[in-house]
Image: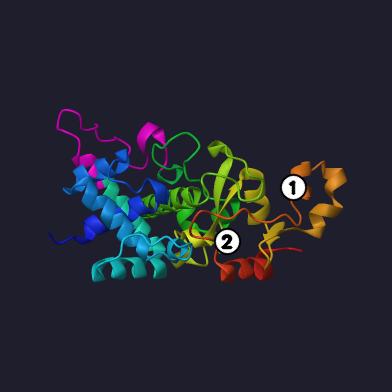
Amino acid sequence: MHWTRDQLLAVLRLYLSLPYGKLDSRNAEIKSLAALIGRTPSAVAMKALNFASLDPSITSTGRKGLTGASQADRNLWAEFQTNSESIANESETLHEQLTLQSFSPQTAPTPDPNPHRGEGGRRPDEGPDQPPGTESKPTDRDRETAPDLQPPTGPTEALQLIRARRVQTFFRRAVLVSYDATCAITGLKEPKLLRASHILPWSTHPARRADPTNGLCLNALFDAAFDRGLITIDNDLRVVVSNRLQKNAKEARLPTSLLEAHGQPLLPPRRLPPDRAALNFHQERIFRG
């Protein structure tokens, strides 16, 4: 049976949401998605593995995924590579629609009387209900430079915020899965303290907003330092702490871990490693030295 674009989008989202080792028909999330899109769990798992066969970060490690990806699979993967932001928004919107459709009339949620707020009174930019600590949070740089992350002043602005929230949610989930929910510098594994850091700024590179290779999984302190250009990653994938931080360390009583990170190798992700060109941009344009 022909796979529709919506079905492929749903599986691509799932592929980027699960570790490679969990792409199995017995997985609960695969079973759930299969029921939502009218496919068998085996078909969903196989389609996810078709996407894996197109992912260089998988095939470069000797894993093959499942050969036989269709032209539609290839086209969608290519589209994700060139405009991840659009694909992220489309797939998250679809997921919300599928989830709502799965409710019976008796269990469907009551419409929110305030459309500018989400479940639990959250604003659209605060993210949907997710496991504790996994909600998407724009960085300081994003707040300052991205107009669509400012508080809404009308219907158009509210829609922009909703789109931004969806894209941030997609990006965070994909980055944390790639790094096994571990800070790439310190090894910290507490999700509540982890952030998906953009390498290329949100405001200036919209097509890369949801690209996991444009992200690093960092704890909140290192995320802030990276965002402000006080640390960077060099060509050998080692941490560089700015002279500014090193000189002011004693007076500022900076955490020892921040200074000790200088020269430490970046922990590699399980897949979708950071784009070297993006890291070079950060070194040259954002790092303050």
Q: CA distance from mark 2 to mark 1?
A: 19 Å
Give the residue number, with chain letter if any, for mark 2.
199
Q: Nearer the viewer, residue 282 or 122?
A: 282
Q: In the picture, residue 109 is in which quadrant?
A: top left
The amino acid pointed to by label 2 is: Ile
Q: Position of residue 26 (x, y in %)?
A: 29, 41
At horizontal 56% and vertical 64% (from top left) the residue drawn is: 200
Q: Quadrant of the N terminus?
A: bottom left
Under circle 1, the secondary element is: helix
Q: Nearer the viewer, residue 273 or 42?
A: 42
The label on residue 258 is 1
Q: Which residues are magenta?
A: 97-123
Q: Main secondary structure of the magenta part?
A: loop
Q: Is residue 18 visible?
A: no
Q: Is residue 193 above or below residue 152?
A: above
Q: Is residue 166 visible?
A: yes
At horizontal 63% and vertical 55% (from top left) the residue drawn is: 227
Q: Position of residue 129 (x, y in %)?
A: 39, 36
At horizontal 28% and vertical 48% (from top left) the residue drawn is: 95
The amino acid pointed to by label 1 is: Leu
Q: Quadrant of the C terminus?
A: bottom right
Q: Please report whichever mark, 2 or 1, sits nearer to the chain's N-terminal start.
A: 2
Other residues around mark 2 within 10 Å, as few (<14) / some (14–19) / many (≥20): many
180 horizontally vs 258: left or right: left
Other residues around mark 1 within 10 Å, as few (<14) / some (14–19) / many (≥20): some
Residue lying farthest to the front in this orientation: 62
Under circle 2, the secondary element is: loop
Q: Position of residue 253 (x, y in %)?
A: 82, 41
